[in-house]
Image (spheres, rainbow, N blue to C red):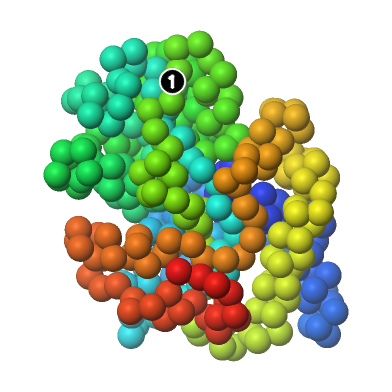
Amino acid sequence: MGTQFGLTYLPFAVMEHEKLIEKQAKARGIGDVQVKWLRSAGGNVMNDALLSGDLDFVATGFPSFLVLWARGKGKFDIKALSSYGTTPLMLLTRDPNVKSIADFSNKNRIAVPAVKSSIQAILIQMAAEKQFGRFDKLDELTISRSHPDAAAALLSGVGEVDSHFSAPPYQYQELDRPGVRLVTTSNEIFGGPLSNGVLYLTTKFHDANPKTIAAVNAALREALELISRDKRRALEMYLAVSGDKISVEEALRTVSDQNTIFDAVPRGTMRYAEFMKRTGGVALAPKDWKEIFFVEAHDLPGN
């Protein structure tokens, strides 16, 4: 199982801590299953690991998934099993001259999980198109960094990274530092909620392992239900698994946000796909969101 860093991946931390995949697998007669968890800085790294067979499942932002889906169409087909939540993301800076997207210049460097292929990178392109009429106007300012590394760089006050399109819990730690300010949010740019990402895998693995797929899907749904019932307990699990040096109260700032939803519903996938197709990020886009999701998600009110 491949995931990334940050509280947007809370459901997977709960799955790991509570051994929910192992539990659901045993309930389906598979027996004892060993689950290995790998955390990477960006979806591009995990895409390579998925294709090489080092990962069976990948959870990351929709753009990285769509790039691989389009690239593999008819060759190594992949689809998504589920989404896993919606959390507003913040674009932050320590540059006192940057108060809006319009103020970024060549002297700024904006850290994102993966240049041109992460949620944050595509959001910057959407904002740039709206502001400048050119979607790639700010691409040369972006630089790939994991969220922990980007947060450390921003808070250090030195070095080339002076801005970070962040994610919880790091964005709140950064925003608490004097001199760091909010430029915009994902909700402002997108005009509404969008999914943090999707859990995806190859069609070959999906079709060959129906009981394993059912176990993983059930484990994710169980984790999402647990978060809804008891956010504090879920966050204690996240901190135990992640090792993040924050308190439960700090983490609660994220899950208590009215725009934060942990559920399986895919949100904003078609808008992302259409934007990436129009701007050349992918060669093709799906005609409907269900085209890129396995049947296990088709009962959800996605878009």
Q: Amino acid at mark 1?
A: Arg
Q: Quadrant of the N terminus?
A: bottom right
Disc 1 element: strand
Please provide percent x and percent y for residue 45.
43, 54
- Of the pair 156 and 119, the residue shown nearer to us: 119
Please provide percent x and percent y for residue 151.
50, 27
Please provide percent x and percent y for residue 215.
73, 76
- Of the pair 199 and 221, the residue shown nearer to us: 221
Residue 88 visible? The answer is yes
**Side of 119 where 17 appears, left or right:** right
Identify the residue at image location x=65%, y=86%: 210
Q: Counting other residues with Cα less than 10 Å from the Cα at mark 1, is it few (<14), some (14-19), or many (20 or more)?
A: many
Q: How many numbered tags mark residues here? A: 1
Q: Which residue is mark 1?
A: 181
Identify the residue at image location x=34%, y=53%: 117
* Quadrant in the rendering for residue 99: top left
Please provide percent x and percent y for residue 135.
20, 47
Identify the residue at image location x=30%, y=20%: 98
Identify the residue at image location x=22%, y=44%: 130
Q: Is residue 248 above or below residue 214?
A: above
**Side of 40 where 274 appears, left or right:** left
Residue 243 visible? The answer is no
Q: Quadrant of the C terminus?
A: bottom left
